[in-house]
Amino acid sequence: MIHPVILSGGTGSRLWPMSRALFPKQLQPLVGFHSLLQDTALRVADPSRFHAPVVVCNAEHRFVVAEQLRQVDRPAAAILLEPMARNTAPAIAAAAEALLARDPDAVMLVLPSDHAMIRPEPWLAGVFAAEATARSGSIVTFGIRPARAETGYGYIRAGAAIADAGPCRKIEAFVEKPDQATAERLVADGRHYWNAGIFLLSARAYLDELRRHEPKIADAASAAVAMGRRDLDFLRLDADAFSSAPSRSIDYAVMERTDHGVVVAVDPGWSDVGSWRALHEIAPQDEHGNVRIGDVLAAGTRNSYLRSNGRLLVTVGVEDLVVVADPDAVLVARRDRAQEVKGVVEALAAAGRAEATSPAVVYRPWGHYRNVDSGAGFQVKRIVVNPGGRLSLQRHAKRSEHWVVVAGVAEVTVGSETRRLGPTESVVVPAGAAHRLANPGDEDLHLIEVQSGAYVGEDDIERLDDAYGRA
């Protein structure tokens, strides 16, 4: 059986405003009903061929990742929390170290969490056909048969076939993202494939190659796992050890240097979902070439990607646009310039705008909240607490809070008093008072929170006790 290793550390800033650092694209339902992370896990859900996945993710996303996998009945065997981003080579090394501790013959299928496949069956057939080759020590990557001369992807040049290795061919070279003329030549050559960043490899073989070419990464990953700390169902990689790893991709650290690299060509309708233009290409379009998602009315509109995550979106007499309306931000861009959104996000972050990183809906292990309104000295939120969910026991130094229950039952603790509130009932939490909110019922709890005070930032929280290990 194969161990899926899902890498979920990216931020997907080219898909702003939906994708933001605190809730990136892999956690979003961009291509269908499920999130990209869930789709990735479901591709490798056959219990006769695959173990439960190992996930490497940002610590900020840990509860959402765990919950999304639980929702599709693919709970992770382990979730490793990166204390900081160090690119793919260290992340894969940490997963390999964790797997070898319980399976000395572990073979890993390394998967980005934010890609789409329209027809995964040909790719799965390639995985199973290359499994024996991977177990023998080769490092297998999967090249996507190019549908066009694409300048946004790197390419892999395939060499000679390998005896007794099925569809595997030696890797002759990796080609960086080309210009248009070079891309057209590569596609016409017939030996070049898009580099999808998917790998099938023995955990031990990968670490051996890493020690040969990038020993600092191998040593750092080994120490980060060995000195890691258990936190509920997660393993927090040791920050000091992991930070000592050079930031390298697996392509640079291993694949471009190893003598054991092989490639399998597949055609699964793959996309890295790297921009709004890419989403327009893979999503179902109407007779005018428009993708319409949400409450959208398109009049005289052609070849556009139109998405509303709430309010009504209307377009009249436009074409070749991307229009994405989130509750707190709206993006309008020419479709052929959608890649430039990343620079806009960097400018927003430099200006200190919360919209650069924080989504309108913020998810927590107990539920989620949405900012409704704010101004000088106040902030209004709509809070939803899942059945059985409970916020931390906390207090605020600079603000008071007024909670009004809209639906469900709230169990409220303020100081030494605990009581239950139903719809239309309310309570005031004074500044400095220890307090907790919980949902003892079997339905979602909805309430409105009004914060008032000299400062209403999220960092004015002192957690005294927490069921999710955040105190």
Image (cartoon, rainbow, N blue to C red):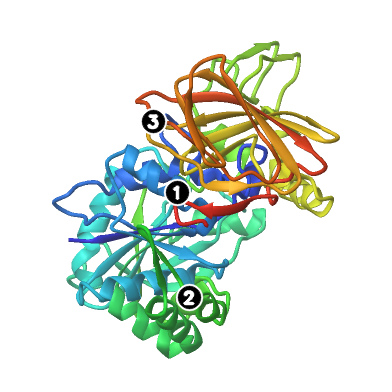
Outermost residue, left direction? Answer: 48
Q: Nearer the viewer, residue 248 or 418?
A: 418
Distance between mark 1 and mark 2 Cα atoms: 19 Å
Amino acid type of the residue that numbered disc 3 sits on in the rendered structure: Pro
Q: Nearer the viewer, residue 257 or 147?
A: 257
> Residue 171: percent from the left, percent from the top?
40, 72
Q: At 28% across and 58% down in the image, what residue appears?
A: 77
Amino acid type of the residue that numbered disc 1 sits on in the rendered structure: Phe
Distance between mark 3 and mark 2 Cα atoms: 36 Å
Left of 305 or right of it: where is 363? Answer: left
Task: Note whether 104 is above or below 470 in the view shown.
Answer: below
Assess disc 1: are there few (<14), some (14-19) or many (≥20) residues with their C-alpha within 10 Å of its C-alpha: some
Left of 281 or right of it: where is 451? Answer: right
Quadrant (top left, top right, bottom left, bottom right) of the N terminus: bottom left
- Observer-side mark, 3 or 2, equals 3
State the mark number for residue 440.
3
Task: Note whether 401 is above or below 309 in the view shown.
Answer: below
Res. 300 image quadrant: top right
Q: Nearer the viewer, residue 345 or 352?
A: 352
Q: At 70% across and 14% down in the image, what residue appears?
A: 314
Which badge, 3 or 1, comes first in the chain's sequence?
1
**Residue under pointer 2:** 238
Left of 327 or right of it: where is 390? Answer: left
Q: Secondary structure at mark 3?
A: loop
Q: Secondary structure at mark 2?
A: loop
**Residue under pointer 1:** 63
Q: Is residue 250 visible?
A: yes
